[in-house]
Image (tube, rainbow, N blue to C red):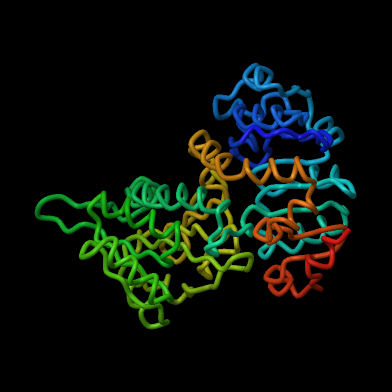
């Protein structure tokens, strides 16, 4: 990984402290900062940015990074900003034309954020739309793994009576039936949710619209999981009889489809639970609305809803390391080559380009928001 940069100039990379409610993750680990420094780049980290997950300022200094006191200093000094969550209003105000922002954006569900980023003039690259040779989403995958596994954990907790649930133990006990878990979506998050739910000895049903994916799940889990093809009738039947519903559907870059209607939720048993992992993209239930770790649940139609938009922050150390393992090669490419050359050489990274100099460059986001789309190829020539 440690290759020379004889002719390339150093890039100034900034890592601000995340400010979203109860967000503990950080854009780069000290180990990642060390890799970037070894490539000749200047890494500037805001004081205390990694403290929430146990990475001290001294650890960053030892890795070759400089520590700056404030977010304002980090944004002012950096050409490339590496974050975790979408920028908040005061961060957007500090973006400038020509600056690169590399983070999760989830723009299809947030028109206001999209318009702010367009006005900023910055180049904004979204983790969640970077692809790989298999058509997968390598920078979304690690957080989907975390969120999928967490979904069962928090769902089981929400089923407890003092949390507003029906008072059901997910795995049951001898002589008492286990809970029924219905998972909407058989992708990375849904598969990881299924693994944990089965490990806790729940009854598990997985619903997806892809027959090839259902066949893969059947081969992976066998009789431990019922696989069902997604139709309105199937979803209605399964959701209405579930103790725990996990929404894990994803349309890359686009708003999540609303598969669960309010009428379905109304028919669920009081004290049942809905965990909507898709809330970052708008949610897959008509009754879903974003929540935070400070106040993660609410009751709607008698059903406990958990719709935290940054679920993995609750296990921030695991999540930060997993995320940085995936993002570091792309950060290195952007820093070593500049964003245009890096994207010319890697069309999968180019798929991550969402906004550049006031233009919207991802078709799914443009379609979801009804905004004008500019193909990124027209911008990569310079």
Q: Is residue 179 above or below residue 39?
A: below
Q: Residue at x 77, y 65 (%)?
A: 361
Taking the image as shown, residue 19 lies to the left or right of residue 243, namely right
Q: How many marks?
A: 0
The quarter holding residue 109 reads: bottom right
Instruction: Pinpoint residue 351: horizontal percent, then vertical percent.
Output: 68, 61
Quadrant where the N terminus is found in the figure: top right
- In this view of the protein, which residue sits in the foreground, 39 or 276? 39
- In this view of the protein, which residue sits in the foreground, 111 or 363? 363
Q: Is residue 255 above or below residue 279?
A: below
- In this view of the protein, which residue sits in the foreground, 92 or 44? 44
Q: Is residue 303 above or below residue 173?
A: below
Q: Residue at x 70, y 45 (%)?
A: 333
Q: Residue at x 81, y 53 (%)?
A: 123
Q: Is residue 72 above or below residue 97?
A: above
The quarter holding residue 3 reads: top right
Quadrant where the C terminus is found in the figure: bottom right
Taking the image as shown, residue 37 lies to the left or right of residue 163, namely right
Instruction: Pinpoint residue 372: horizontal percent, then vertical percent.
Output: 81, 73
Instruction: Pinpoint residue 268: horizontal percent, then vertical percent.
Output: 36, 69
Q: Residue at x 64, y 32 (%)?
A: 2
Instruction: Pinpoint residue 212: horizontal percent, then vertical percent.
Output: 39, 74
Taking the image as shown, residue 181 lies to the left or right of residue 66, namely left
């Amino acid at each position: 990984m440690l290759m020379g940069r004889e002719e390339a100039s150093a890039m100034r990379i900034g890592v601000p402290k995340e400010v979203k409610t109860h967000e503990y993750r950080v854009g780069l680990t000290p180990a990642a900062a060390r890799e970037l420094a070894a490539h000749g780049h200047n890494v500037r980290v805001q004081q205390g940015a990694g403290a929430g997950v146990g990475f001290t300022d001294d650890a960053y200094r030892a890795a070759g990074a400089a520590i700056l006191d404030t977010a304002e200093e980090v944004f002012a000094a950096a050409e490339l900003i590496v974050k975790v969550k979408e920028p908040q209003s005061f961060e957007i105000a500090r973006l400038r034309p020509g600056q690169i922002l590399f983070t999760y954006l989830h723009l299809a569900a947030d028109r206001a954020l999209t318009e702010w980023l367009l006005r900023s003039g910055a180049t904004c690259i979204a983790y969640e739309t970077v692809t790989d040779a298999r058509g997968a989403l390598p920078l979304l995958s690690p957080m989907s793994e975390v969120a999928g596994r967490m979904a069962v954990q928090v769902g089981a907790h929400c089923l407890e009576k003092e949390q507003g649930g029906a008072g059901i133990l997910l795995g049951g006990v001898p002589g008492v039936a286990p809970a029924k878990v219905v998972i909407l979506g058989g992708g990375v998050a849904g598969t990881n949710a299924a693994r944990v739910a089965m490990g806790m000895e729940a009854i598990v049903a997985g619903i997806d619209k892809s027959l090839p994916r259902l066949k893969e799940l059947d081969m992976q889990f066998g009789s431990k999981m019922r696989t069902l093809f997604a139709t309105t009738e199937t979803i209605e039947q399964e959701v209405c009889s579930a103790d725990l519903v996990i929404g894990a559907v994803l349309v890359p870059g686009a708003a999540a489809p609303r598969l669960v209607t309010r009428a379905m939720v109304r028919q669920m048993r009081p004290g049942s639970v809905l965990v909507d992992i898709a809330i970052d993209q708008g949610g897959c239930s008509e009754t879903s609305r974003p929540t935070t770790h400070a106040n993660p649940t609410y009751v709607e139609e008698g059903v406990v809803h958990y719709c935290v938009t940054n679920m993995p922050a609750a296990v921030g150390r695991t999540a930060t390391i997993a995320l940085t393992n995936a993002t570091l090669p792309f950060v290195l490419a952007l820093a070593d080559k500049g964003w245009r050359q890096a994207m010319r050489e890697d069309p999968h990274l180019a798929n991550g380009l969402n906004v550049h100099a006031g233009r919207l460059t991802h078709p799914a986001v443009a379609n979801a928001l009804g905004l004008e789309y500019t193909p990124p190829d027209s911008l990569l020539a310079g």
